[in-house]
Amino acid sequence: MNQPTAGSTPRRIFIDKQSPKAYHALVQTSEAVRAAAADAGLDRTLVELVNLRVSQINGCAYCLHVHTRAALRAGETTQRLGVLPAWRDTELFSPAERAALGLAEATTEPADAAAQESAYTAARAALTEDQISAVIWVAITINAFNRVSILSKHPAQAGS
């Protein structure tokens, strides 16, 4: 058992390792979502922007680490990554990217019905139905991975 010593907190269980079948199912879902996004014509950089924005909202250091590297490998610029938290205040993102980012935020924080409706309306104007579905699924799966990493306290290590 993982008992803390005086003045310490217990080490977190890496739930992906503790329940590998459940984690593998999540990985398989992510692979299906990635394929659906590609089939819908979503560029890999847009998918990574969604992964990053959702991870920023959730404060998942591990997923931010992983998806920043993936975005850069996919051709994303450091300038756009740097201003991603303020995407609404810049002209660096296309209408489709803006629609996807708004929809991803609404998926991550669904309690604000007005913001959700506004994001969905903007998405309908800029994205196809397949793209809307894919963006929502990308946001759902990265939200799930964020929870796995946050609750497990996965480290974001330098150089990895």
Image (cartoon, helix red, strand yellow):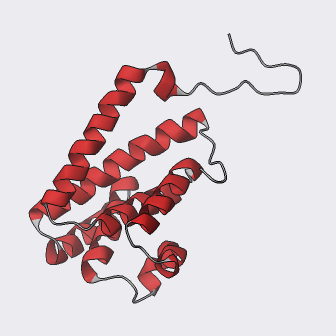
| Picture layout, residue 11 above or below residue 93 | above
State whether residue 59 is above or below residue 76.
above
For the point 77% across and 27% down, the residue is: 9
Given the current orientation, which residue lies at the most extreme top position?
Answer: 1
x and y, in percent, of residue 92 in the image: 40, 86
* Residue 110 visible (yes or no): no
Relative image position of residue 42 (x, y in whole percent): 21, 66
Q: Position of residue 64 (x, y in %)?
A: 53, 56
Relative side of 145 to 83, left or right: left
Q: Quadrant of residue 24?
A: top left
> Residue 136 falls in which quadrant of the image?
bottom left
Residue at coordinates 47% horizontally, 45% vertically from top-left?
146
Residue at the image point whose x is 39% and y is 29% from the top: 23
Residue 72 visible, this orientation: yes
**Residue farthest right in this picture:** 6
The mark tally for this picture is: 0
In screen coordinates, is 66 left or right of 36?
A: right
Q: Residue 107, image x and y in percent? A: 33, 55
Relative to 65, 97 lies left or right: left
Question: In the picture, which quadrant includes the N terminus?
Answer: top right
